[in-house]
Image (cartoon, grey):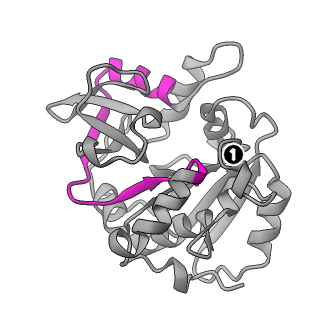
Amino acid sequence: MSVVTQCLILAAGNGSRIASVAGGVPKPLVPLCGVPLLEHVMTSSREAGIERFVIVAGYRADLIRRWLSDRSMDGISVKLIENLEYQKANGVSALAAKTELNQPFLMLMSDHIFEPKTAKGLLRQPLEHDEVILAVDPKVDRVFDLDDATKVRYQGGHILEIGKDLSSYNALDTGMFLCSPTLFNRLESAKKNGDCSLSDGMRKLAHDRKLRAFDIGDGHWQDVDSPQALAHAEEIFDRDFCGNLAVESFVNG
C-alpha cells in the first residue's frame, strides 16, 4: 500500500455565518486560540504525514495567498488554486483541483479542526482505486450543532446515506476523506446546472457501495462554522486538542 502524502483543503466559502466575528478576513484565516483555522488544519495534517497541500480558495483568496506567502513552509509544498465560482456548492471547489491530484489524497475542510491521530488512522486505511473513505463519528450526542452537521447512515463499514436532513442516521460526517481520484468523476456526474455539493458526489459513491466509513473512535473534531461554534472550540481546545501543535506551528510568520 502506497503512503498518502498529499492533501486537498477546501477553503473557498465566504463564511457568511461567521462573518460577524471574522474581522473582514475569510473564514480560513479566522483565529482559534490565536491561530488561523487553516493553520490548525495544515499543522495537524503535517503531523499526520502530509507533505504536499493543494488549497482551493475563493472568497478573499488574495488574503489567503498573502498569508501563505508570508510564511516559511519548510518540508512541504503548497499550491493555491482560486475558484472563481466559490459561491456555488463545495463540490465545485473540489473539482477545481482535479488536474492537481491523480493519486490518492486526503481531503479536508478549512474550518474543521481535528486531532493528528485521527488523520493518521484514516491515512492507514487500505483504499481501492475507485472508492472514498469518510471518517465518521458515531458519538452523535457530543456534537455541538447537530442541526448543521452532515449525518451518515452506515452498516458493515459501508455508508448507505449521507446528508444534513437524514431522519435516520448513526454517525456524523467529520469532514475528513481519504479519496481516490475517482471522486472527481463522481462529482462531475453529479453536476446539475454546473453545480454540485460533496454530498451529491458521495451519494453517487454510496449507491455503488464505493463509500466506506472509518470510525474515529475516541478522536475529537470540531466544525467551526459560526460565532457560537468558534466560542465552543475555544472553550474545549485545551481539553480535547491539547496534543495539537498549531500554537507552535510549523509555519512561522
The crowd level at tag 1 (other Cα within 10 Å; few <14, some 14-19, many 20+) is some
In the rendered image, which quarter is residue 153 located in? top left
What range is drawn magenta here? 199-227
- Which residue occupies the foreground of this view, 146 or 198? 146
- Which residue occupies the foreground of this view, 213 or 50? 213
Q: Residue at x 45, y 49 (%)?
A: 104
The residue sitting at the left extreme is: 156
> Pointer 1: what residue?
15
| For residue 140, side relative to residue 185 (left or right) | left
Q: Is residue 51 visible?
A: yes
Amino acid bearing label 1: Gly
Q: Residue at x 43, y 75 (%)?
A: 47
- Vertical placement of residue 198 versus 48, above or below: above
Q: Quadrant of the C terminus?
A: bottom right
- Percent coordinates x, y for residue 224 in the rendering: 53, 53
- Percent coordinates x, y for residue 128 in the rendering: 31, 40
- Percent coordinates x, y for residue 123 in the rendering: 34, 58
- Which residue occupies the foreground of this view, 137 or 134? 137
The residue sitting at the right extreme is: 62
- Percent coordinates x, y for residue 80 in the rendering: 73, 57
Q: Quadrant of the N terminus?
A: bottom left
Q: Is residue 213 magenta?
A: yes
Q: Is residue 150 magenta?
A: no
Give the SS element for disc 1. loop
In the rendered image, which quarter is residue 203 located in? top left
